[in-house]
Amino acid sequence: MRPIRKMEGGVSLNNIYRLLLTFNATSTMVVIYLIKEKYYLLLLQNATIWLSHILFALVPLLFTLISIWMKGLLSKDDINYEMLNIEEANNSFLPSYLGYFFVALSVNSVETMIFIYSIVFIFTYFSQTSYFNPLFLLFGYKFYYVYTVNNVKLFIISKKDINTTRGLEFPKLRRINNTTFIDEEDKK
């Protein structure tokens, strides 16, 4: 495996990308809270509140598109060795993600929301693998756990439809961290 790329000053592009993925994974919690509390953008105070809510919802979508574009800045990697097993991870993350929605719906004050969001953001960032963002599904990505012959569990974000490990290779990956990768190849 290849090393993680560093920018000047020692900050890794992977850390910046992980911050972006963490924001993507948790930002809908804030959007739901803002909509529940009927917040609106001051610039649109004379417009319908729905316009503000639509713009709030577009923010996570825009940042997801930015993260898809930014994957090309991450260090290149590949997996060209035998894999023992593959498991689709789309459904395993959904309960956790829906939990963010229920938390946002139950919070009654801005201060509490800021505190809870900060905790969720920090835990998600440091969990190293919780980069599940359902908005990736809208762009054709799927989430997989791949188990190597050394019994290492890798998290792969890919557009491929994978249901067997026979002949499975990932020649064009971008490394997010030591166990998480995003595939550059389109569906096959």
Image: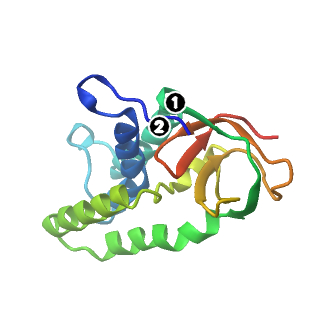
User: Dot 1, crowdedness within 10 Å: few (<14), some or many (≥20)?
Assistant: few
Which residue position holds label 2? Answer: 67
Residue 126 in the image: above or below residue 107: above
Q: Does residue 63 appear in the picture of this structure?
A: yes
| In-image side of 9 versus 65 (left or right) | left
Inspect this view and state whether residue 31 appears: no
Left or right of 153, for residue 35 = left
The N terminus sits in image quarter: top right
Give left or right: position of 145 versus 126. Answer: right
Discs 1, 2 touching: Cβ within 8 Å: yes
Above or below, 102 against 156 in this view is: below
Q: Nearer the viewer, residue 91 or 5?
A: 5
Q: Secondary structure at mark 1?
A: helix
Give x and y (percent) for residue 12: 34, 34
How far across and down, in percent of the image, does residue 70 sit?
Answer: 48, 30
Q: Position of residue 169 (x, y in %)?
A: 76, 43
Q: Residue at x 31, y 43 (%)?
A: 47
Please, what is the three-letter code of the amino acid marked with disc 2?
Ser
Disc 1 residue type (three-letter): Trp
Q: Which mark is residue 130?
A: none
Residue 6, position as x, y percentages in the image? 35, 29
Label of residue 69 in the image: 1
Mark 2 secondary-structure assignment: helix
Q: Which residue ends up furthest to the top in the rendered image?
A: 8
How packed mark 2 is, by other alpha carbons closer than 10 Å (few <14, some 14-19, many 20 or more), is: some
User: Relative to 132, is 176 above or below?
Assistant: above
- Furthest residue in direction front, as rendered: 150
The residue sitting at 58% across, 55% down in the picture is 155
* Quadrant placement of the C terminus: top right
Could you tell me which residue is drawn at 48 percent across and 43 percent down?
Answer: 176
Report which quarter residue 111 is drawn in: bottom left
